[in-house]
C-alpha cells in the first residue's frame, strides 16, 4: 500500500510537470502585477475538471486527464502485483 501511494505521488508530480509544459499556465501564472506566481487552486481545478466535464475524456486529451492517468497507474500496478503472484505461485 505504501508503495502504491509513493508511486501515485511520483506520477502526480510528473503529471503536473508534463501538464505545465504541454498546456502551460496551469500552475505557474502571471498575477495582476504581471509577476509569476504559483496558482494551486487552478492546478487543483484542472486535476478534477475531467470529473465534471467530459471534454478531457476525448482520446486526444487523455494525456492531460489526471483521473485517467491515476486509474491507468493503479491498474498497471495491480496487474504487475497479480502477475508476480502467479509467477511465484507456479515456481516455488
Image (spheres, helix red, strand yellow):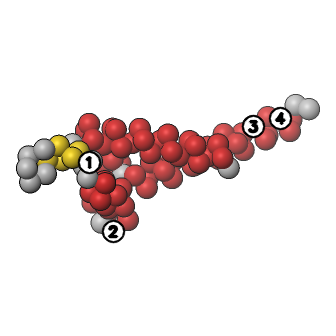
In the structure shown, which secondary structural element does the residue marked by tag 4 occupy? helix
- Residue to which mark 3 is pinned: 84
Sequence-wise first label, 3 or 2:
2
| Mark 4 crowd level (few <14, some 14–19, many ≥20, 10 Å Cα) | few
Q: Residue 9 vs residue 53: left or right?
A: right
Q: Quadrant of residue 7?
A: top right
Disc number at residue 38? 1
**Circle 2 sits on which residue?**
52
> Can residue 24 be seen from the camera position used here?
yes
Which residue is rendered at x = 44% and y = 45% of the image?
Answer: 12
| Coordinates of residue 11 in the picture (x, y in percent) | 47, 41
The residue carrying pointer 2 sits among few (fewer than 14), some (14 to 19) or many (20 or more) residues within 10 Å by Cα, namely few
* Residue located beneath label 4 in the image: 88
Figure label count: 4
Q: Nearer the viewer, residue 36 or 46?
A: 36
**Measured Cα–Cα span from mark 2 to mark 4:** 42 Å
Amino acid at each position: 500500500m505504501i508503495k502504491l501511494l509513493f508511486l501515485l505521488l511520483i506520477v502526480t508530480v510528473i503529471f503536473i510537470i508534463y501538464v505545465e509544459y504541454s498546456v502551460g499556465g496551469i500552475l505557474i501564472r502571471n498575477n495582476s502585477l504581471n509577476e509569476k506566481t504559483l496558482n494551486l487552486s487552478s492546478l487543483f481545478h484542472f486535476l478534477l475538471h475531467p470529473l465534471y466535464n467530459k471534454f478531457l475524456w476525448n482520446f486526444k486529451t487523455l494525456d492531460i486527464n489526471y483521473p485517467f492517468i491515476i486509474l491507468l497507474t493503479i491498474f498497471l500496478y495491480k496487474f504487475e502485483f497479480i502477475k508476480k503472484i502467479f509467477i511465484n505461485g507456479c515456481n516455488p
